[in-house]
Amino acid sequence: MAFTQPNLADAHDTLPRMPPWVTSARAETLEDVAFLSGAALATLHLVVGRADVPHALLRDRLSLTASEACMRLLGRPERAAELRDAVHLLRPGDQPGPAGAIYLQWQRAVARPVSVKALQRALPSVTAEQIATWLDTERGGPVMRAATVLEAVLAAHPREEVMALILADAVLAQSLGWTHVLPLLAVGLKSRDLRLQGADLQLACHKALVASIGATLPIAFDLTRRAAHLQAVVPKLRAKGAGDAVALFLTKDALSPAIALGVPGVGMSDRAARRLCDRLVDLGVMRELTGRDTFRLYGV
């Protein structure tokens, strides 16, 4: 995604806010909760359409959040730090463990525009024909369609919760006219919700969307502000490949300088990459995420 020079003062402050009554209202009926989730989705839709939001970075951050949620659903102990290590410290040819594999699934699901081919890249165990069938679900509005697909996938593959959630969020995004998957249902639904059916599952999906969008919007505001600050310091950087490195950081939640910045297109040496990252931390536009002296990871 191309970025224009931001207005540093208030770029993120102009983003639409969700009305407080959406998250504070007590609603239990399907009609009332559907109204609230519609208001939440409408607000997020406005944010999704904003050019100053670092969309690739936001999606990648949300893929981590979705992976954490899936760890909880599956009863696994891994959280953000372990998931980042499991993926971002992989060398070419390395294979991730089970937690890392789920994180990679989400990263692949959000990285490219919604399509059968892109989803099969994230879900190689299911056929393109079956993915196409689920994407073509036309029953009801966006949330009903997503819930229908979620229920259908779990009925056919009861132990494939991650696959079902990826496909449900993909159908939701496609139904709303979004180009890419945003992990929302995966973040908001609980394990008990996945055992529901019909109207009960639809109700759970509406409630999940209110909660997950309420958590997603502050992330979008924060990343928009941080991305603007990072872009503003690019003219101050003298290291060869610094601009390409910054562009990469604007698409990824976390990177290992030794691994990620040595790739073709950036081509920085291990030492130069580390120095650049430390310089960006000193400038206050980058964070070191691990607290370690070695095997460090950096992110916006």
Image (tube, rainbow, N blue to C red):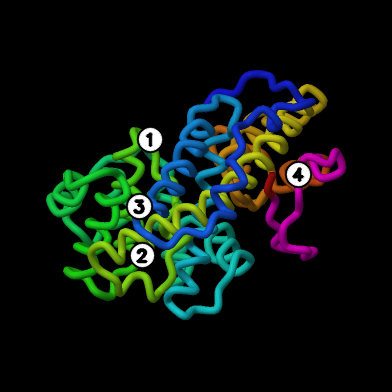
Q: Secondary structure at mark 4?
A: loop
Disc nearer the start of the sequence (4/1): 1
Q: Give the camera-side residue of 87 and 41.
A: 41
Q: Can residue 242 be seen? A: no
Relative vertical location of residue 140 with respect to residue 76 in this rendering, above or below: above
Tell me the chief SS of the magenta region: loop
Report how far apart the C-alphas of labels 4 and 1 lie in the structure.
29 Å
Are the two marked residues, 4 and 2, in contact with CB atoms closer than 8 angstroms?
no
Q: Which mark is drawn over residue 286?
A: 4
> Looking at the picture, does residue 80 appear above or below residue 139?
below
- Determine if the magenta segment contains residue 143: no
| Front-most of residues 256 and 3 | 3
Q: Quadrant of residue 17?
A: top right
Q: Which mark is residue 162?
A: 2
Left or right of residue 9, residue 5 in this image? left
- Residue density around tag 2, few if under 14, some if 14–19, many if 20 or more, within 10 Å: many
In the image, residue 285 lies in the stretch drawn in magenta: yes
Q: Are marks 3 and 2 in contact (CB under 8 Å)?
A: no
Q: In the rendering, at what x and y percent does residue 8 appear?
A: 76, 25
Disc nearest the viewer among 3 and 2: 3
Residue, disc 3: 31
Q: Residues within 10 Å of mark 4 (few under 14, many from 20)?
A: many
* Amino acid at pointer 4: Met
4 and 1 marks in contact (CB < 8 Å): no
Q: Amino acid at mark 2?
A: Val
Residue in view at x 46 percent, y 36 percent: 42
Q: Which residues are magenta?
A: 280-298
Q: Choose the circle earlier in sequence order: 2 or 1.
A: 2
- Tell me, for residue 178, which label it has, or none: 1
Mark 4 or 2, which is nearer the eye?
A: 2
Q: Give the mark toward the camera: 2 or 1.
A: 1
Pointer 4 or 2: first along the chain: 2
